[in-house]
Image: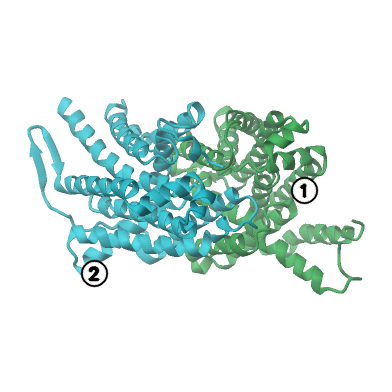
């Protein structure tokens, strides 16, 4: 029993790292554009399919394939932001919050159903990044999961370095604190919005590409991670990348412990999907600013 | 206002004549269109008028449908009584959700209601000993005859009742309060609007109409699956409201009817339909935020000579 719990905990940690990628993308988008992106799960889904086709059609090795999938998700996000989100920055638009919600919700319906047509409704599974399993004592873990976790950690470190050290990262932070002041000191705020939305998309896309060999790909695979990412972002504090990473690991591990300890296994698996939703609702009710909420990042 | 009366009479006659002219297939489409019209109009009341962004509206459709079906099946209640009880359940749960969401606004409310809706769907799917799970729940049907005409008339009656009740509400002082809350809660409170009371009230009312539509659906279709509370259903309702025009009850009804007719007319295109509605929703939001039908109506009014124009 203890070894089972250990395996579950490590699996939860791996999934937590994937969650952290998705949720940090969501929180970057949120803190700069001040919108909740309801289409984030669908960009994650697209990333998975991009990874699949890059590996199977172009025969690119796994690690570059993840990077190509991220680049493609970045490009799709740039297109979406430029074509559909520009009214958010137009002073003539009334009730921008409602616009952001409805437009991203519409994008999610469009992409999900387009994916059913283009990629087919049946689950696809990309080839393994790295066949075989890692066995350490009682711990058994497939290399795919190790690869996904390691790559995820590298991407997260790169993201934190980019946000904290690079000029662009600091510009993004400035825009998240005040659009007007950032524009006054010469930051191109329009470009910052596009960059933030595309960066968030690339992170989700990378997560999708990493998850491909672990779970199968399907057009509706984005629905659950989308709400899990909401839960993580709210739990970690809207707009805080560090908070999102910690909350993601917490949620990943507690979710797989929930499955492991739930008395009725079939129900446990089914209710695991509801677990993050209940966490989300509870956090929204009890502590809407989350664990590491920043005052200026509050929703308008 | 007076010039509108002949239009309403025309619409009424056409609606009453429809079931006797349409073939059974299109009669079913008409009944489903009316079902969606009630759901969309009540969502419009909640979102368009009161500005309470809920993505959990179809959860109340599911709640009303399952509550009514289960009361008939397991409790042995007569259908009309069970439907009324289901509406009451939705009223209470809706007021509860409205009450605990009082601190939330905009996106937070949208996320919370979406989460509530998904949790309800997962519970319905999982507790298959009671609800039949994804295999479906057999519900007693209201009539046993061959023709669907009685269903159509009941649906039409429910639609007229719902529209009249909601229409009177939004034209009264309450409608003014709802819109004041939508525009600026603090300012509304400062002007003496009881924000808490009216936010809970609009949630309860909109949810009970959704539950009413759900209960009717259950006893018309006779078969319930958790899919009636799915995110795609919510997306369809949102598309109907936005394409019609999300700040007007008649526009929402027309949007629902137009989209439902399109859904059936384009049946051969299968999955492309939802892509089309997604695209229409985005284009409407991007270029005609007051709704495609509202836009078309205004163009028509401008094109017609003054004398003929209907005010």
Quick one: which chain is green? B
Residue B72: quadrant of the picture = top right
What is the quadrant of residue B203 in the picture? top right
Q: Which chain is cyan?
A: A
Q: Is residue B75 left or right of residue B170?
A: left
Q: Secondary structure at mark 1?
A: helix
| Tag 2 and tag 1 share a subunit | no
Q: Residue at x 72, y 32 (%)?
A: B189
Image quarter in which the N terminus of chain A is found: top left
> Disc 2 versus disc 1: distance between alpha carbons?
57 Å
Q: Is residue A107 above or below residue A146?
A: below
Q: Residue A57: give its label.
A: 2
Front residue of this view, candidates A68 and A170: A170
Judging depth in this view, the residue of B250 and A191 nearest the camera is A191
- Residue A1 appearing in the image: no
From this view, report whether residue A99 is shown above or below residue B53: below
């Amino acid at each position: 029993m203890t070894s089972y719990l250990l395996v579950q905990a490590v699996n939860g940690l791996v999934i937590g790292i994937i969650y952290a990628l998705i949720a940090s993308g969501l929180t970057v988008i949120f803190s700069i554009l001040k919108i909740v992106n309801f289409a984030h799960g669908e960009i994650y889904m697209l990333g998975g399919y991009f990874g699949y086709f890059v590996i199977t059609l172009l025969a690119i090795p796994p690690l570059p394939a993840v990077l190509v999938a991220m680049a493609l998700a970045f490009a799709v996000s740039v297109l979406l932001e430029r074509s559909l989100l520009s009214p958010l920055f137009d002073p003539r638009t009334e009730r921008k919050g409602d616009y952001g919600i409805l437009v991203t919700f519409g994008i999610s319906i469009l992409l999900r159903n387009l994916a059913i047509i283009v990629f087919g409704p049946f689950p696809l599974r990309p080839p393994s990044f790295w066949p075989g399993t890692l066995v350490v004592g009682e711990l058994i873990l497939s290399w795919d999961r190790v690869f996904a976790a390691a790559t995820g950690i590298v991407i997260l470190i790169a993201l934190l370095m980019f946000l904290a050290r690079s000029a662009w990262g600091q510009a993004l932070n400035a825009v998240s604190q005040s659009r007007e002041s950032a524009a006054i000191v010469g930051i191109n705020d329009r470009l910052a919005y596009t960059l933030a939305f595309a960066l968030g998309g690339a992170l989700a896309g990378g997560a999708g590409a990493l998850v491909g060999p672990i779970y199968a790909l399907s057009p509706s695979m984005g629905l659950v991670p989308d709400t899990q990412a909401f839960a993580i972002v709210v739990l970690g504090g809207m707009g805080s990348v560090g908070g999102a990473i910690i909350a993601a690991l917490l949620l990943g591990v507690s979710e797989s412990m929930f499955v492991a300890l739930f008395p009725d296994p079939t129900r446990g698996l089914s209710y695991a999907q509801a677990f993050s939703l209940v966490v989300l609702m509870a956090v929204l009710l009890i502590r809407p600013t989350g664990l590491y909420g920043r005052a200026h990042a509050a929703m308008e | 206002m007076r010039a509108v009366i002949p239009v309403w009479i025309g619409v009424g006659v056409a609606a009453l004549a429809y079931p006797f002219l349409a073939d059974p297939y299109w009669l079913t489409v008409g009944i489903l269109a009316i079902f969606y019209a009630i759901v969309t109009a009540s969502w419009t009341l909640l979102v368009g008028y009161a500005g309470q962004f809920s993505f959990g509206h179809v959860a109340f459709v599911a709640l009303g449908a399952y509550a009514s079906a289960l009361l008939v099946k397991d409790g042995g209640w007569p259908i009309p009584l069970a439907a009324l009880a289901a509406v009451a359940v939705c009223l209470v749960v809706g007021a509860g959700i409205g009450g605990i969401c009082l601190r939330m606004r905009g996106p937070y409310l949208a996320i919370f209601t979406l989460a509530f809706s998904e949790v309800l769907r997962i519970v319905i799917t999982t507790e298959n000993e009671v609800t039949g799970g994804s295999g479906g729940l057999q519900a007693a049907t209201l009539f046993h005859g061959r023709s669907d005409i009685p269903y159509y008339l009941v649906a039409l009656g429910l639609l007229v009742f719902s529209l009249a009740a909601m229409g009177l509400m939004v034209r009264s002082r309450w409608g003014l309060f709802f819109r004041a809350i939508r525009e600026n809660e603090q300012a509304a409170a400062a002007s003496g609007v009881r924000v808490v009371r009216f936010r809970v009230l609009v949630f309860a009312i909109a949810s009970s109409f959704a539950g009413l539509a759900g209960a009717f659906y259950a006893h018309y279709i006779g078969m319930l699956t958790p899919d009636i509370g799915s995110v795609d259903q919510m997306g369809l309702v949102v598309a109907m409201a936005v394409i019609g025009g999300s700040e007007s009850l008649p526009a929402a009804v027309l949007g629902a009817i137009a989209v439902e007719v399109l859904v059936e007319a384009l049946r051969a295109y299968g999955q492309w339909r939802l892509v089309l509605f997604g695209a229409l929703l985005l284009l409407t939001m991007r270029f005609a935020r007051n709704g495609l039908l509202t836009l078309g109506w205004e163009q028509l009014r401008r094109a017609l000579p003054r004398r003929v124009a209907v005010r």
